[in-house]
Image (spheres, rainbow, N blue to C red):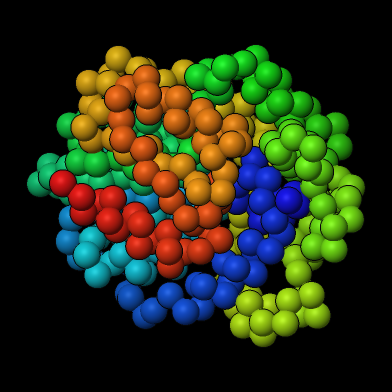
Amino acid sequence: MAATAFPFVAWAPSGSDKITAFRRTEKTMTDRTPVRTGLLTVDGATLHHEVRGEGPLLVMMPGGSADAGIYDAIAADLADRWTVATFDPRGYSRSPLDGPVTDQSPATHADDIVRLIDLLSPDGAPAALFGSSSSAVVALAALARHPGRLSRVVAHEPPVVALLPDPDAGRALFAAVREAFRRDGVAAAMATMAAGLAPEGEAASDPEGEALGPEQAADPERAPTREQNPDPERAADPTPEQAATFQRMHANLPVFLEHVLCPFSGYVPDLVALKAASAQLVVGVGRDSRALLPAVAAERLARRVDAGVVEFPGGHIGLTEDPRAFAARLRKVLLAT
């Protein structure tokens, strides 16, 4: 497996081909569904949000360094059944903070979500909530703090290291990633992440199987070329809109690595509150990542709070690997009674 090249989830030890997979599928899924944009003032920040479709409210939270753009394909697909709201988390992209950036709190982000739900569901109807990776941690905090505002919560691979068999090792890994960022920058942090999360005996490598150094490991240009991948649609260049999305997400990486990664992975979930709301909670795991830290933590969480576990296509970043299949599985989960 290669180090992550796509910047939105830095702790996914997935292949650099995921960028082109995202490009290819988004082209076929994204339609002309009207997008309504707005700004919401919350405590200490202003949130950019985007809304598509009509029906019950579904809020989709970006993880890692991602913003609302990561859900363009999936949101368009689900907008036939739901009012799908996405947003840029506070301090990212188009959601500026009122002051200097500091370490972020899952509880604060959870309260932001409820403010957004209150705005978009003024009649008090509860909303469905989806989060992946670090935003799945926010989903857990939101359910524990505001269960009455949520109808169903899907938390896909929340990396809650406190529930691992060896939580100290998990904390040490993410602390090492942050230290690598402080010392040598984003590329070194990404390489440290990929190496720490790769299956035992498997090193980060490029599409030709060569080991990658820190600079190459986080380089989006190491995605498969047209020669390495003869599928012309898969190897197509991104649209200007997609390129702008990638640039925004990459620009968010310093905030993620310095102020989100450790506070969110170190979050200790309120197991009592989550068990009381377990009927509303579905824990997602990737079919291809069940042996890796985030999925292991997620399944241990599910057992502790008596929540259901659903396998999703792909790995930790399955929502970009195959958005169509991921959206289809999410649709089934949300419609299940």
Extreme residue toward the bottom, this view: 232
Q: Quadrant of residue 73?
A: bottom left
Q: Position of residue 91 (x, y in %)?
A: 54, 42
Q: Is residue 49 above or below residue 89?
A: below
Residue 291 can be seen in this image: yes
Task: Please give the name of the residue rendered at 74% of the width and 35% of the height, measured from the top-left corner.
Answer: 200
In the displayed structure, does residue 148 sit left or right of residue 285?
left
Residue 85 can be seen in this image: no
In the displayed structure, does residue 134 sit left or right of residue 113?
right
Q: Quadrant of residue 265?
A: top right
Count of number-bearing discs: 0
Q: Is residue 12 above or below residue 141?
A: below
In the displayed structure, does residue 227 sit left or right of residue 290?
right
Q: Position of residue 130 (x, y in %)?
A: 36, 46
**Front-lying residue, 137 or 32:** 137
Task: Please give the name of the residue rendered at 78% of the width and 42% of the height, measured from the top-left corner.
Answer: 202
Extreme residue toward the left, this view: 123
Q: Position of residue 129 (x, y in %)?
A: 31, 44
**Front-lying residue, 195 or 80:** 195
Task: Please give the name of the residue rendered at 25% of the width and 51% of the height, measured from the top-left corner.
Answer: 334
**Front-lying residue, 274 or 34:** 274
**Front-lying residue, 70 or 164:** 164
Task: Please give the name of the residue rendered at 80% of the width and 62% of the height, measured from the top-left corner.
Answer: 207
Q: Position of residue 159 (x, y in %)?
A: 53, 31
Q: Is residue 256 above or below residue 211?
A: above
